[in-house]
Amino acid sequence: MEKIDVIIIGAGAAGLMCAIEAGKRGRKVLVLDHANKVGKKILMSGGGRCNFTNYHIHPDCYISHNKHFCKSALSRYTQWDFIELVQRHRIPFHEKTLGQLFCDNKSKDIVDMLLAECQQAQVEIYLNTDVKKLAKLNDRHFQLTTSRGQLHCQSLVIASGGLSIPTMGASPLGYKIAEQFGLKVWPTRAGLVPLTLHVADKEKLAELSGIAVDCLVSNERQDFRENMLFTHRGLSGPAILQISSYWQAGEKLLINMLPEINIGEQLKQAQQQQPQKQLKTVLADHLPKRVIETFIAAEVAETKLQAISHQTLEQVGLNINAWLLKPNGTEGYRTAEVTLGGIDCDAISSKTMETNHTPGLYFIGEVLDVTGWLGGYNFQWAWSSGWAAGQVV
């Protein structure tokens, strides 16, 4: 039986960061993954350019039943620390919008950087390796039965991720291990995910597929101002992905497609100044033609402003500034960027990521009940939680 100081299950962002830090401390580290390559989610993220962190990381940008849990790790290994690592490896990057940082070239740059750091720290990685069984032998030792045989370690780190994008090999392994050791697992659901529509809305909006509009999307708990994309299945784009993590089934969303303008009032002013103009001509200065055709009845849109009542103009304003929509659901884990819910953080040390009642067992990254916003927040949680565990395992 091979004896190792630290075994990490999961060769993703959190697992590799933890491995690097533990290896630097002289620990003998082995990373196991059932996939055929490391960092699959890193490689596909950000359209292949990896949105690896954000300038504006803040604990308020994370969802958890324990809202204070993420503060310690995020404050001890910050976005600036990870940026410094990226710069040290001379990886060119740029800010896209709202503090989001992307590689200039490819996501592979980040994976290559992590692998180079692993190599320097003498970390060993076994791919195509399944964990079939694990058991705690005594106070601080674990035995793993894997497709490569028996393994033995002092510290066991679970960095197996969530359920999002099953085609990338997502599995519930981490949750099963948590339950094996008596930890509570909050119900999971898809987060940062496109929304689907009821049949009537889907038919009404079918012609808009491919159109994006800047909007403010809100519910009673949260609001986001970014682009919304109409798709053949429903709604997507950053604003929708963001609000999806805060949306509950059966709830309505309020969508303002012209957040900078009270269009009802502006139309009344235009009525005074340009009475001969058709309504659709004035609206065309602000919205795509197909959006106007979908949200405003043709007989109204083609009428001259002077012939339209104030009440009708106000209703047009509401259609655009206060569109109330009840989504049918989400596209689910298939296209979700993250998994909401997961292992209860009350059972974990926020400083070390070690379980309170099972010494030597650690959970990091997405498998925990910590979910960040779109835009590099979830990668930063992976780096920070992985780093925190790496200091002590």
Image: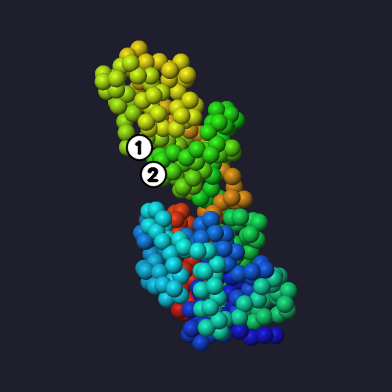
Q: Residues within 10 Å of mark 2 (few under 14, many from 20)?
A: some
* Real-space Cα separation, disc 2 to disc 1, in angstroms: 8 Å
Say which quadrant the N terminus sits in.
bottom right
Which secondary structure lies at badge 2? strand
Q: Can you see residue 311?
A: no
Q: Position of residue 102 (x, y in %)?
A: 45, 61
Mark drawn on residue 171: none
Q: Count of labels shown?
A: 2
Q: Nearer the viewer, residue 241 or 185?
A: 241
Q: Residues within 10 Å of mark 1 (few under 14, many from 20)?
A: some
Mark 1: amino acid: Pro
Check the image and report above or below for 140 versus 311: below
Residue underneath mark 2 = 225
Mark 2: amino acid: Arg
Quarter of the view holding residue 361: bottom right
Which secondary structure lies at badge 1? loop
Q: Position of residue 244 (x, y in %)?
A: 49, 45
Residue drawn at 49 percent across, 66 percent down: 382
State if disc 1 and disc 2 touch (CB < 8 Å).
Answer: yes
In the rendered structure, the answer to whether residue 269 lies left or right of residue 337 reads left
Residue drawn at 40 percent across, 15 percent down: 303
Mark closest to the chain's N terminus, 2 or 1? 2
Residue drawn at 54 percent across, 72 percent down: 112
Q: Nearer the viewer, residue 42 or 90?
A: 90
Q: Nearer the viewer, residue 291 or 243?
A: 291
Check the image and report above or below for 233 versus 102: above
Residue underneath mark 1 = 259
Quarter of the view holding residue 196: top right
Check the image and report above or below for 291 versus 238: above
